[in-house]
Amino acid sequence: MHLDWTALGQVTVVSIGVTVAVVVVFALGVLGLAQAEAARERDGRSHPLAVAQAGLCFLACAAVVVYGIYLIVPQFH
Amino acid sequence: MDHITFLVAVVIVTALAFDFTNGFHDTANAMATSIATGALRPKTAVLISGALNIAGAFLSTEVARTISGGIVDDTLVTPGMIFAGLVGAILWNLLTWLLGLPSSSSHALFGGLIGAVWVGAGSHGVHFDKVVEKVLIPAFASPVVAGLAALLATYLAYRITARARKESVTRGFRLGQIASASLVSLAHGTNDAQKTMGVITLTLISAGALGHDAGPPAWVIASAGLAIGLGTCLGGWRIIRTMGKGLTDIQSPQGFAAEAASTTVILTSAHLGFALSTTQVCSGGILGAGLGRRLAEVRWGTAGRMVIAWLVTLPAAALVGGVSAGVVKHGGNAGTVVIALVAAAVSAFIVITSRRNPIHANNVNETHEVTIRGTAPTRVGSAA
Protein backbone atom coordinates (compact mmCIF):
# COMPACT_ATOMS: atom_id res chain seq x y z
CA MET A 1 0.00 0.00 0.00
CA HIS A 2 1.32 3.37 -0.95
CA LEU A 3 0.15 6.43 0.89
CA ASP A 4 0.98 9.73 -0.68
CA TRP A 5 1.57 11.80 2.43
CA THR A 6 3.00 14.68 0.41
CA ALA A 7 -0.20 15.01 -1.59
CA LEU A 8 -2.26 14.73 1.57
CA GLY A 9 -0.16 17.43 3.20
CA GLN A 10 -0.47 19.63 0.12
CA VAL A 11 -4.25 19.29 0.12
CA THR A 12 -4.32 20.23 3.79
CA VAL A 13 -2.04 23.25 3.54
CA VAL A 14 -3.47 24.58 0.27
CA SER A 15 -7.09 24.07 1.37
CA ILE A 16 -6.68 25.78 4.70
CA GLY A 17 -4.57 28.58 3.23
CA VAL A 18 -6.91 29.34 0.33
CA THR A 19 -10.07 29.09 2.43
CA VAL A 20 -8.77 31.41 5.12
CA ALA A 21 -7.42 33.86 2.56
CA VAL A 22 -10.66 33.99 0.56
CA VAL A 23 -12.88 34.35 3.62
CA VAL A 24 -10.64 36.99 5.21
CA VAL A 25 -10.53 39.04 2.00
CA PHE A 26 -14.28 38.68 1.56
CA ALA A 27 -14.83 39.68 5.20
CA LEU A 28 -12.69 42.78 4.63
CA GLY A 29 -14.86 43.55 1.60
CA VAL A 30 -18.02 43.15 3.66
CA LEU A 31 -16.50 45.33 6.36
CA GLY A 32 -15.75 48.05 3.80
CA LEU A 33 -19.28 47.85 2.47
CA ALA A 34 -20.77 48.03 5.97
CA GLN A 35 -18.63 51.05 6.84
CA ALA A 36 -19.59 52.79 3.61
CA GLU A 37 -23.27 52.21 4.33
CA ALA A 38 -22.97 53.34 7.92
CA ALA A 39 -21.07 56.49 6.89
CA ARG A 40 -23.63 57.35 4.23
CA GLU A 41 -26.44 57.11 6.74
CA ARG A 42 -24.49 59.10 9.32
CA ASP A 43 -23.40 62.11 7.30
CA GLY A 44 -25.10 61.63 3.98
CA ARG A 45 -22.04 61.48 1.74
CA SER A 46 -20.30 58.58 0.17
CA HIS A 47 -17.09 57.17 1.55
CA PRO A 48 -14.80 56.47 -1.41
CA LEU A 49 -12.08 54.75 0.59
CA ALA A 50 -14.42 52.20 2.13
CA VAL A 51 -16.13 51.62 -1.22
CA ALA A 52 -12.76 51.10 -2.90
CA GLN A 53 -11.72 48.63 -0.19
CA ALA A 54 -14.93 46.66 -0.72
CA GLY A 55 -14.56 46.75 -4.50
CA LEU A 56 -10.96 45.54 -4.46
CA CYS A 57 -11.72 42.72 -2.04
CA PHE A 58 -14.74 41.50 -3.99
CA LEU A 59 -12.74 41.69 -7.21
CA ALA A 60 -10.05 39.49 -5.68
CA CYS A 61 -12.69 36.97 -4.58
CA ALA A 62 -14.25 37.01 -8.05
CA ALA A 63 -10.83 36.20 -9.49
CA VAL A 64 -10.60 33.15 -7.20
CA VAL A 65 -14.08 32.03 -8.32
CA VAL A 66 -13.04 32.33 -11.96
CA TYR A 67 -9.96 30.24 -11.22
CA GLY A 68 -12.21 27.70 -9.51
CA ILE A 69 -14.38 27.45 -12.64
CA TYR A 70 -11.21 27.08 -14.69
CA LEU A 71 -10.19 24.13 -12.51
CA ILE A 72 -13.64 22.51 -12.75
CA VAL A 73 -14.01 22.71 -16.54
CA PRO A 74 -11.43 20.49 -18.27
CA GLN A 75 -11.85 22.17 -21.67
CA PHE A 76 -10.00 25.21 -20.31
CA HIS A 77 -6.87 23.27 -19.42
CA MET B 1 -28.69 -2.10 -30.70
CA ASP B 2 -28.84 -5.92 -30.81
CA HIS B 3 -25.95 -5.99 -28.33
CA ILE B 4 -28.17 -4.58 -25.65
CA THR B 5 -29.45 -7.59 -23.81
CA PHE B 6 -32.10 -7.64 -21.15
CA LEU B 7 -29.46 -7.47 -18.41
CA VAL B 8 -27.67 -4.52 -19.98
CA ALA B 9 -30.95 -2.63 -20.29
CA VAL B 10 -31.67 -3.32 -16.62
CA VAL B 11 -28.19 -2.09 -15.64
CA ILE B 12 -28.70 1.16 -17.57
CA VAL B 13 -32.05 1.83 -15.94
CA THR B 14 -30.63 1.00 -12.50
CA ALA B 15 -27.60 3.21 -13.07
CA LEU B 16 -29.85 6.13 -13.96
CA ALA B 17 -31.97 5.42 -10.87
CA PHE B 18 -28.80 5.54 -8.75
CA ASP B 19 -27.82 8.79 -10.44
CA PHE B 20 -31.22 10.21 -9.53
CA THR B 21 -30.86 9.24 -5.84
CA ASN B 22 -27.31 10.63 -5.96
CA GLY B 23 -28.79 13.94 -7.11
CA PHE B 24 -31.33 14.43 -4.36
CA HIS B 25 -29.10 12.90 -1.72
CA ASP B 26 -26.39 15.47 -2.45
CA THR B 27 -28.43 18.64 -3.03
CA ALA B 28 -27.74 19.42 0.59
CA ASN B 29 -23.98 19.53 0.06
CA ALA B 30 -24.16 22.64 -2.03
CA MET B 31 -27.34 24.25 -0.88
CA ALA B 32 -28.14 23.34 2.74
CA THR B 33 -26.34 26.26 4.33
CA SER B 34 -27.60 28.75 1.73
CA ILE B 35 -31.15 27.61 2.41
CA ALA B 36 -30.65 27.71 6.19
CA THR B 37 -29.26 31.26 6.20
CA GLY B 38 -31.86 32.56 3.75
CA ALA B 39 -29.28 33.40 1.09
CA LEU B 40 -31.49 31.57 -1.39
CA ARG B 41 -35.12 30.56 -1.19
CA PRO B 42 -35.38 26.74 -0.96
CA LYS B 43 -36.97 26.18 -4.39
CA THR B 44 -34.59 28.65 -6.09
CA ALA B 45 -31.63 26.94 -4.47
CA VAL B 46 -32.48 23.44 -5.71
CA LEU B 47 -33.27 24.74 -9.22
CA ILE B 48 -29.90 26.50 -9.44
CA SER B 49 -28.17 23.43 -8.09
CA GLY B 50 -29.98 21.13 -10.54
CA ALA B 51 -29.17 23.34 -13.52
CA LEU B 52 -25.49 23.54 -12.52
CA ASN B 53 -25.37 19.78 -12.03
CA ILE B 54 -26.64 19.26 -15.58
CA ALA B 55 -24.23 21.89 -16.89
CA GLY B 56 -21.38 20.20 -15.03
CA ALA B 57 -22.26 16.83 -16.54
CA PHE B 58 -22.05 18.23 -20.08
CA LEU B 59 -18.93 20.30 -19.42
CA SER B 60 -16.74 17.49 -18.33
CA THR B 61 -16.18 14.72 -20.85
CA GLU B 62 -13.09 13.22 -19.29
CA VAL B 63 -14.85 10.12 -18.10
CA ALA B 64 -12.78 7.92 -15.88
CA ARG B 65 -11.75 4.72 -17.64
CA THR B 66 -12.47 2.68 -14.58
CA ILE B 67 -15.74 2.34 -12.76
CA SER B 68 -14.19 2.38 -9.38
CA GLY B 69 -10.74 3.95 -9.57
CA GLY B 70 -9.07 0.58 -9.09
CA ILE B 71 -10.97 -0.48 -5.98
CA VAL B 72 -12.22 -3.59 -7.72
CA ASP B 73 -10.68 -5.49 -10.61
CA ASP B 74 -12.59 -4.05 -13.56
CA THR B 75 -11.70 -6.96 -15.82
CA LEU B 76 -13.68 -9.34 -13.60
CA VAL B 77 -16.74 -7.12 -13.40
CA THR B 78 -19.84 -8.32 -15.25
CA PRO B 79 -23.06 -6.37 -15.89
CA GLY B 80 -24.74 -8.58 -13.30
CA MET B 81 -22.30 -7.44 -10.61
CA ILE B 82 -22.71 -3.81 -11.60
CA PHE B 83 -26.47 -4.23 -11.31
CA ALA B 84 -26.14 -5.83 -7.86
CA GLY B 85 -23.76 -3.11 -6.69
CA LEU B 86 -26.09 -0.37 -7.90
CA VAL B 87 -29.00 -1.95 -6.03
CA GLY B 88 -26.97 -1.88 -2.82
CA ALA B 89 -26.05 1.76 -3.37
CA ILE B 90 -29.62 2.86 -4.20
CA LEU B 91 -31.17 1.16 -1.18
CA TRP B 92 -28.58 2.61 1.21
CA ASN B 93 -29.04 6.09 -0.30
CA LEU B 94 -32.81 5.87 0.19
CA LEU B 95 -32.54 4.60 3.75
CA THR B 96 -30.15 7.34 4.84
CA TRP B 97 -32.36 9.89 3.08
CA LEU B 98 -35.34 8.64 5.09
CA LEU B 99 -33.34 9.13 8.29
CA GLY B 100 -32.07 12.51 7.08
CA LEU B 101 -28.45 11.40 7.35
CA PRO B 102 -25.93 12.94 4.96
CA SER B 103 -23.94 9.88 3.94
CA SER B 104 -21.68 9.55 0.94
CA SER B 105 -23.25 8.44 -2.36
CA SER B 106 -19.79 7.58 -3.65
CA HIS B 107 -19.12 5.29 -0.70
CA ALA B 108 -22.50 3.65 -1.25
CA LEU B 109 -21.58 2.97 -4.88
CA PHE B 110 -18.10 1.70 -3.97
CA GLY B 111 -19.55 -0.45 -1.18
CA GLY B 112 -22.19 -1.96 -3.43
CA LEU B 113 -19.59 -2.78 -6.08
CA ILE B 114 -17.16 -4.25 -3.56
CA GLY B 115 -19.84 -6.53 -2.14
CA ALA B 116 -21.06 -7.58 -5.58
CA VAL B 117 -17.57 -8.32 -6.91
CA TRP B 118 -16.59 -10.17 -3.75
CA VAL B 119 -19.55 -12.52 -4.06
CA GLY B 120 -19.53 -12.64 -7.86
CA ALA B 121 -15.81 -13.06 -8.54
CA GLY B 122 -14.22 -13.89 -5.20
CA SER B 123 -12.22 -11.80 -2.75
CA HIS B 124 -9.26 -11.49 -5.15
CA GLY B 125 -11.47 -9.22 -7.28
CA VAL B 126 -11.41 -6.58 -4.54
CA HIS B 127 -8.24 -4.56 -4.01
CA PHE B 128 -8.39 -3.96 -0.28
CA ASP B 129 -5.22 -1.87 -0.17
CA LYS B 130 -6.81 0.49 -2.70
CA VAL B 131 -9.94 0.63 -0.55
CA VAL B 132 -7.83 1.92 2.33
CA GLU B 133 -5.85 4.31 0.17
CA LYS B 134 -8.66 5.71 -1.96
CA VAL B 135 -11.63 5.52 0.37
CA LEU B 136 -10.75 5.23 4.03
CA ILE B 137 -7.85 7.69 4.31
CA PRO B 138 -9.57 10.50 2.36
CA ALA B 139 -12.76 9.75 4.30
CA PHE B 140 -10.98 10.48 7.57
CA ALA B 141 -8.78 13.30 6.34
CA SER B 142 -11.07 15.37 4.13
CA PRO B 143 -13.80 16.31 6.65
CA VAL B 144 -11.11 17.18 9.20
CA VAL B 145 -9.26 19.41 6.74
CA ALA B 146 -12.49 21.11 5.60
CA GLY B 147 -13.54 21.48 9.23
CA LEU B 148 -10.24 23.08 10.28
CA ALA B 149 -10.29 25.45 7.33
CA ALA B 150 -13.90 26.47 8.01
CA LEU B 151 -13.20 26.85 11.74
CA LEU B 152 -10.29 29.23 11.22
CA ALA B 153 -12.07 31.13 8.47
CA THR B 154 -15.26 31.52 10.51
CA TYR B 155 -13.36 32.74 13.55
CA LEU B 156 -11.51 35.35 11.49
CA ALA B 157 -14.63 36.41 9.59
CA TYR B 158 -16.39 37.16 12.88
CA ARG B 159 -13.33 38.93 14.29
CA ILE B 160 -12.98 41.15 11.23
CA THR B 161 -16.62 42.10 10.99
CA ALA B 162 -17.26 42.26 14.75
CA ARG B 163 -17.78 46.03 14.86
CA ALA B 164 -19.60 46.41 11.56
CA ARG B 165 -23.36 46.68 11.27
CA LYS B 166 -24.93 43.28 11.53
CA GLU B 167 -27.46 43.69 8.68
CA SER B 168 -24.79 44.78 6.21
CA VAL B 169 -22.57 41.86 7.21
CA THR B 170 -25.37 39.31 6.94
CA ARG B 171 -26.41 40.61 3.53
CA GLY B 172 -22.84 40.70 2.22
CA PHE B 173 -22.10 37.12 3.19
CA ARG B 174 -25.44 35.93 1.84
CA LEU B 175 -24.50 37.25 -1.59
CA GLY B 176 -21.14 35.53 -1.29
CA GLN B 177 -22.88 32.29 -0.40
CA ILE B 178 -24.74 32.26 -3.72
CA ALA B 179 -21.40 32.17 -5.56
CA SER B 180 -19.76 29.63 -3.27
CA ALA B 181 -22.78 27.29 -3.28
CA SER B 182 -22.95 27.45 -7.07
CA LEU B 183 -19.32 26.39 -7.35
CA VAL B 184 -19.97 23.37 -5.13
CA SER B 185 -22.91 22.40 -7.38
CA LEU B 186 -20.86 22.71 -10.54
CA ALA B 187 -18.01 20.65 -9.12
CA HIS B 188 -20.55 18.06 -7.99
CA GLY B 189 -22.07 17.80 -11.46
CA THR B 190 -18.72 17.24 -13.11
CA ASN B 191 -17.76 14.55 -10.59
CA ASP B 192 -20.86 12.58 -9.71
CA ALA B 193 -22.70 12.51 -13.03
CA GLN B 194 -19.49 11.13 -14.53
CA LYS B 195 -19.54 8.17 -12.21
CA THR B 196 -22.85 7.05 -13.69
CA MET B 197 -21.64 7.74 -17.23
CA GLY B 198 -18.61 5.59 -16.50
CA VAL B 199 -20.77 2.76 -15.16
CA ILE B 200 -23.08 2.78 -18.21
CA THR B 201 -20.21 3.13 -20.69
CA LEU B 202 -18.29 0.22 -19.21
CA THR B 203 -21.41 -1.90 -19.18
CA LEU B 204 -21.91 -1.17 -22.88
CA ILE B 205 -18.26 -1.98 -23.57
CA SER B 206 -18.43 -5.26 -21.69
CA ALA B 207 -21.57 -6.16 -23.66
CA GLY B 208 -19.80 -5.43 -26.93
CA ALA B 209 -22.08 -2.54 -27.91
CA LEU B 210 -19.15 -0.12 -27.84
CA GLY B 211 -15.51 -0.40 -28.81
CA HIS B 212 -12.91 -0.88 -26.10
CA ASP B 213 -11.69 2.68 -25.85
CA ALA B 214 -15.00 4.34 -26.61
CA GLY B 215 -16.09 7.38 -24.67
CA PRO B 216 -19.67 7.74 -23.50
CA PRO B 217 -22.20 8.19 -26.35
CA ALA B 218 -24.16 11.44 -26.37
CA TRP B 219 -27.32 9.78 -25.08
CA VAL B 220 -25.44 8.47 -22.05
CA ILE B 221 -24.08 11.93 -21.22
CA ALA B 222 -27.51 13.48 -21.69
CA SER B 223 -29.44 10.91 -19.68
CA ALA B 224 -26.92 10.80 -16.82
CA GLY B 225 -26.83 14.60 -16.64
CA LEU B 226 -30.62 14.82 -16.66
CA ALA B 227 -31.05 12.08 -14.06
CA ILE B 228 -28.74 13.74 -11.54
CA GLY B 229 -30.13 17.20 -12.36
CA LEU B 230 -33.75 16.12 -11.91
CA GLY B 231 -32.85 14.35 -8.67
CA THR B 232 -31.21 17.53 -7.44
CA CYS B 233 -34.24 19.65 -8.38
CA LEU B 234 -36.46 17.30 -6.40
CA GLY B 235 -34.48 18.38 -3.37
CA GLY B 236 -33.44 15.98 -0.64
CA TRP B 237 -35.19 18.11 1.97
CA ARG B 238 -34.65 15.63 4.78
CA ILE B 239 -30.88 15.81 4.37
CA ILE B 240 -30.95 19.56 3.71
CA ARG B 241 -32.63 20.02 7.09
CA THR B 242 -29.99 17.98 8.89
CA MET B 243 -27.07 19.75 7.23
CA GLY B 244 -28.52 23.25 7.33
CA LYS B 245 -30.23 23.16 10.71
CA GLY B 246 -29.42 19.90 12.47
CA LEU B 247 -25.66 20.03 12.92
CA THR B 248 -25.51 23.61 14.11
CA ASP B 249 -27.39 26.88 13.66
CA ILE B 250 -25.73 28.47 10.69
CA GLN B 251 -25.43 32.22 10.07
CA SER B 252 -24.41 33.63 6.72
CA PRO B 253 -20.69 34.24 7.53
CA GLN B 254 -20.48 30.63 8.70
CA GLY B 255 -22.29 29.38 5.62
CA PHE B 256 -19.87 31.26 3.40
CA ALA B 257 -16.84 29.96 5.30
CA ALA B 258 -18.16 26.38 5.21
CA GLU B 259 -18.85 26.51 1.48
CA ALA B 260 -15.54 28.18 0.72
CA ALA B 261 -13.75 25.45 2.66
CA SER B 262 -15.71 22.67 0.92
CA THR B 263 -15.08 24.09 -2.54
CA THR B 264 -11.36 24.47 -1.91
CA VAL B 265 -10.94 21.00 -0.46
CA ILE B 266 -12.92 19.41 -3.33
CA LEU B 267 -10.99 21.29 -6.00
CA THR B 268 -7.51 20.83 -4.56
CA SER B 269 -8.09 17.11 -3.96
CA ALA B 270 -9.53 16.57 -7.44
CA HIS B 271 -6.52 18.42 -8.84
CA LEU B 272 -4.15 16.12 -6.95
CA GLY B 273 -6.10 12.98 -7.76
CA PHE B 274 -7.76 12.18 -4.45
CA ALA B 275 -11.23 10.70 -4.65
CA LEU B 276 -13.32 11.98 -1.82
CA SER B 277 -16.87 12.33 -0.70
CA THR B 278 -18.46 15.72 -1.32
CA THR B 279 -20.92 14.95 1.46
CA GLN B 280 -18.27 14.34 4.07
CA VAL B 281 -16.27 17.39 3.07
CA CYS B 282 -19.32 19.65 3.28
CA SER B 283 -20.43 18.20 6.63
CA GLY B 284 -16.93 18.71 8.01
CA GLY B 285 -16.99 22.30 6.79
CA ILE B 286 -20.33 22.94 8.47
CA LEU B 287 -19.15 21.48 11.79
CA GLY B 288 -15.98 23.56 11.63
CA ALA B 289 -18.01 26.68 10.92
CA GLY B 290 -20.18 25.83 13.93
CA LEU B 291 -17.16 25.57 16.20
CA GLY B 292 -15.57 28.73 14.78
CA ARG B 293 -18.36 31.01 16.00
CA ARG B 294 -18.11 31.37 19.72
CA LEU B 295 -21.13 30.15 21.62
CA ALA B 296 -22.54 28.49 18.53
CA GLU B 297 -24.10 25.22 19.47
CA VAL B 298 -22.94 22.09 17.69
CA ARG B 299 -25.39 19.24 18.13
CA TRP B 300 -22.97 16.43 18.75
CA GLY B 301 -25.76 13.85 18.90
CA THR B 302 -26.70 14.57 15.29
CA ALA B 303 -23.05 14.79 14.26
CA GLY B 304 -22.36 11.45 15.95
CA ARG B 305 -25.23 9.71 14.16
CA MET B 306 -23.95 11.15 10.90
CA VAL B 307 -20.44 9.80 11.51
CA ILE B 308 -21.86 6.37 12.36
CA ALA B 309 -23.73 6.48 9.05
CA TRP B 310 -20.42 7.27 7.31
CA LEU B 311 -18.78 4.24 8.91
CA VAL B 312 -21.67 1.93 8.11
CA THR B 313 -22.27 3.13 4.53
CA LEU B 314 -19.62 1.06 2.80
CA PRO B 315 -20.20 -2.26 4.61
CA ALA B 316 -24.00 -1.90 4.50
CA ALA B 317 -24.08 -1.21 0.77
CA ALA B 318 -21.54 -4.02 0.31
CA LEU B 319 -23.82 -6.44 2.14
CA VAL B 320 -26.85 -5.61 -0.03
CA GLY B 321 -24.65 -5.64 -3.14
CA GLY B 322 -23.21 -9.03 -2.17
CA VAL B 323 -26.59 -10.63 -1.50
CA SER B 324 -27.95 -9.25 -4.78
CA ALA B 325 -24.90 -10.50 -6.66
CA GLY B 326 -25.42 -13.97 -5.20
CA VAL B 327 -29.02 -14.07 -6.39
CA VAL B 328 -28.15 -12.70 -9.83
CA LYS B 329 -25.25 -15.14 -10.22
CA HIS B 330 -27.30 -18.23 -9.44
CA GLY B 331 -30.65 -17.08 -10.73
CA GLY B 332 -29.68 -15.56 -14.08
CA ASN B 333 -32.31 -13.33 -15.66
CA ALA B 334 -34.97 -14.61 -13.26
CA GLY B 335 -32.74 -13.70 -10.32
CA THR B 336 -32.20 -10.24 -11.78
CA VAL B 337 -35.95 -9.73 -12.08
CA VAL B 338 -36.46 -10.90 -8.49
CA ILE B 339 -33.80 -8.49 -7.17
CA ALA B 340 -35.18 -5.63 -9.24
CA LEU B 341 -38.70 -6.25 -7.92
CA VAL B 342 -37.53 -6.58 -4.31
CA ALA B 343 -35.47 -3.38 -4.64
CA ALA B 344 -38.45 -1.54 -6.14
CA ALA B 345 -40.69 -2.77 -3.31
CA VAL B 346 -38.23 -1.71 -0.60
CA SER B 347 -37.77 1.69 -2.28
CA ALA B 348 -41.54 2.19 -2.45
CA PHE B 349 -41.83 1.25 1.22
CA ILE B 350 -39.17 3.81 2.17
CA VAL B 351 -40.86 6.54 0.14
CA ILE B 352 -44.25 5.73 1.69
CA THR B 353 -42.71 5.75 5.17
CA SER B 354 -41.22 9.19 4.49
CA ARG B 355 -44.76 10.50 3.85
CA ARG B 356 -45.59 10.04 7.51
CA ASN B 357 -43.46 13.03 8.31
CA PRO B 358 -42.91 14.80 5.01
CA ILE B 359 -40.23 17.45 4.72
CA HIS B 360 -40.39 19.83 1.78
CA ALA B 361 -39.41 23.30 0.62
CA ASN B 362 -41.90 24.98 2.92
CA ASN B 363 -40.99 23.36 6.21
CA VAL B 364 -37.34 22.50 5.72
CA ASN B 365 -36.11 25.23 8.06
CA GLU B 366 -38.78 24.84 10.75
CA THR B 367 -37.00 22.51 13.13
CA HIS B 368 -33.67 20.77 13.24
CA GLU B 369 -34.92 17.23 13.60
CA VAL B 370 -35.74 14.63 11.01
CA THR B 371 -38.07 12.01 12.42
CA ILE B 372 -39.84 9.20 10.68
CA ARG B 373 -42.74 9.01 13.10
CA GLY B 374 -45.58 11.40 12.36
CA THR B 375 -45.20 14.60 14.36
CA ALA B 376 -47.90 16.52 16.18
CA PRO B 377 -50.72 17.38 13.78
CA THR B 378 -50.36 21.10 14.48
CA ARG B 379 -46.92 21.22 12.94
CA VAL B 380 -47.87 19.08 9.97
CA GLY B 381 -50.93 21.26 9.44
CA SER B 382 -49.03 24.50 9.53
CA ALA B 383 -46.38 23.15 7.21
CA ALA B 384 -48.74 21.93 4.50
Image: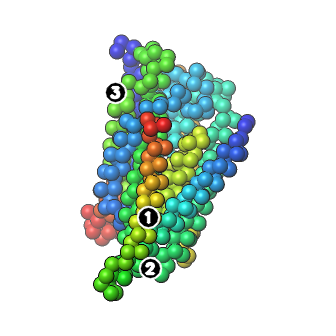
Q: Position of residue A34 (x, y in %)?
A: 40, 76
Crowding at dot 3, Cα within 10 Å, few <14 / some 14-19 / many 20+, comes out as: few
Residue ID for mark 2: B164
Observer-nearest of B205 and A47: A47
Q: Position of residue B54 (x, y in %)?
A: 35, 41
At label 1, the amino acid type is Leu
Q: Earlier in the sequence, mark 3 or mark 2?
A: 2
Residue drawn at point x = 55 percent, y = 70 percent: B156
At label 3, the amino acid type is Trp
Determine the secondary structure under disc 3: helix
Determine the secondary structure under disc 2: loop
At label 2, the amino acid type is Ala
Question: Nearer the viewer's eye, disc 2 or disc 1?
Answer: 1
- Outermost residue to the right: A1
Residue drawn at point x = 40 percent, y = 66 percent: A55
Tell me: residue B296, above or below residue B102: below
Residue drawn at point x = 34 percent, y = 27 percent: B219
- Outermost residue to the top: B2
Observer-nearest of B235 and A62: A62
Crowding at dot 1, Cα within 10 Å, few <14 / some 14-19 / many 20+, comes out as: some
Observer-nearest of B205 and B122: B205
Crowding at dot 2, Cα within 10 Å, few <14 / some 14-19 / many 20+, comes out as: some
Give the position of the C terminus of chain B as an image quadrant.
Answer: bottom left
Question: Nearer the viewer's eye, disc 3 or disc 2?
Answer: 2
Residue A56 is tagged as 1
Residue ID for mark 3: B219
Tell me: residue B347, above or below residue B182: above
**Disc 3 chain ID:** B
Question: Nearer the viewer's eye, disc 3 or disc 1?
Answer: 1
